[in-house]
Image: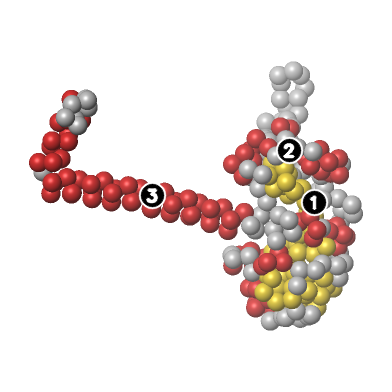
């Protein structure tokens, strides 16, 4: 009587389940195990994705805006006639973003952007006694850049405070040079500029290559060393949604000046 109002398919299913109780138990157990495996795999993939994004993007920005590349154009004598058939690409020189302050203002006004930090970066040579190492110097404004890469959390010795005479280096570079917090290092560039800086902190970015090569100094110090006072070589941008980084990049930068 209780099943008289049920559809025919339900009545047949209930009778089959009642007759093969052991089989029904196996079916329920199999479905429960299958659902449990799916839930476990979904949670595992979500956790791995979140951990990967956190580890990778905690040491770099979501978007990097760069100055335009120098290109070579063929010599033309007419509308379609080219005199020079061989075009040699020019050497890409280190240069500043033109009117970068106005670009920063424009990007900060975008609702999808969280932080914009100017960076003056380039290659240099670090000298300690008879030992030297090729390094990448990044001049930053700590109050803005640390909101993108929180170096304070990655410091293993010393602190992340940066003044005009301080430098932050990685753990592997410190080991190679045999230096500690407070030691002096001489930084020279290909342009002939040089400066003696004191190690204020030693960081660990979780990557041996980064710990051997990356160094951080104050923005004005890097500008003086690299030879473009008041200029910056890139703008580091963090957005609210990392998956929308390409859409967030300004349209006139997307082709070759906006790296994600």
The residue that label 3 is drawn on is: 39
Q: Quadrant of the N terminus?
A: top left
- Kindly identify which residue carries mark 2: 111
* Local SS, label 1: strand
Q: CA distance from mark 1 to mark 3?
A: 43 Å
Q: On the image, numbered disc 1 is attached to which residue?
A: 118
Which mark is drawn over residue 21?
Answer: none
Q: Closer to the N terminus: mark 1 or mark 3? A: 3
Taking the view exactly as shown, the residue that stands out farthest to the right is 229
First in residue order: circle 2 vs circle 1 = 2
- The answer, for residue 88, to whether it is visible in the render is no
Query: Mark 3 packing: few (<14 Cα in 10 Å), some, or many (20+)?
Result: few
Q: Nearer the viewer, mark 1 or mark 3?
A: 3
- Image point (9%, 41%), residue name: 19
Question: In the rendered view, how is the structure colored?
Answer: secondary structure
- Which-is-in-front pick, marks 2 and 1? 2
Residue 71 at x, y = what percent?
A: 73, 37
């Amino acid at each position: 009587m209780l099943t008289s109002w049920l559809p025919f398919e339900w009545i047949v299913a209930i009778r089959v389940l009642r007759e093969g109780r052991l089989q029904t138990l196996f079916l329920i157990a199999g479905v429960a195990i299958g659902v449990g495996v799916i839930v476990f795999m979904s949670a595992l993939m979500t956790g791995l994705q979140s951990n990967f994004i956190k580890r990778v993007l905690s040491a770099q920005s979501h978007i990097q805006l760069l100055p335009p590349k120098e290109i070579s154009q063929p010599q033309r004598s007419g509308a379609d006639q080219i005199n020079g058939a061989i075009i040699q690409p020019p050497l890409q020189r280190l240069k500043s973003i033109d009117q970068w302050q106005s670009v920063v203002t424009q990007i900060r006004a975008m609702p999808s952007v969280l932080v914009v930090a100017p960076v003056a970066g380039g290659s240099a040579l670090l000298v300690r006694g008879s030992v030297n190492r090729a390094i990448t110097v990044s001049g930053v404004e700590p109050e803005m850049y640390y909101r993108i890469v929180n170096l304070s959390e990655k410091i293993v010795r010393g602190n992340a405070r940066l003044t005009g005479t301080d430098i932050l280096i990685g753990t592997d570079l410190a080991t190679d040079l045999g230096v500690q917090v407070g030691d002096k290092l001489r930084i020279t560039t290909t342009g002939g500029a040089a400066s003696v800086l004191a190690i204020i902190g030693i960081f660990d970015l979780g990557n041996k290559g980064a710990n051997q090569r990356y160094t951080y100094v104050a923005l004005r110090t890097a500008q003086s060393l690299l030879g473009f006072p008041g200029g910056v070589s890139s703008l580091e941008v963090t957005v609210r949604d990392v998956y929308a980084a390409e859409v967030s990049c300004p349209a006139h930068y997307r082709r070759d000046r906006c790296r994600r």
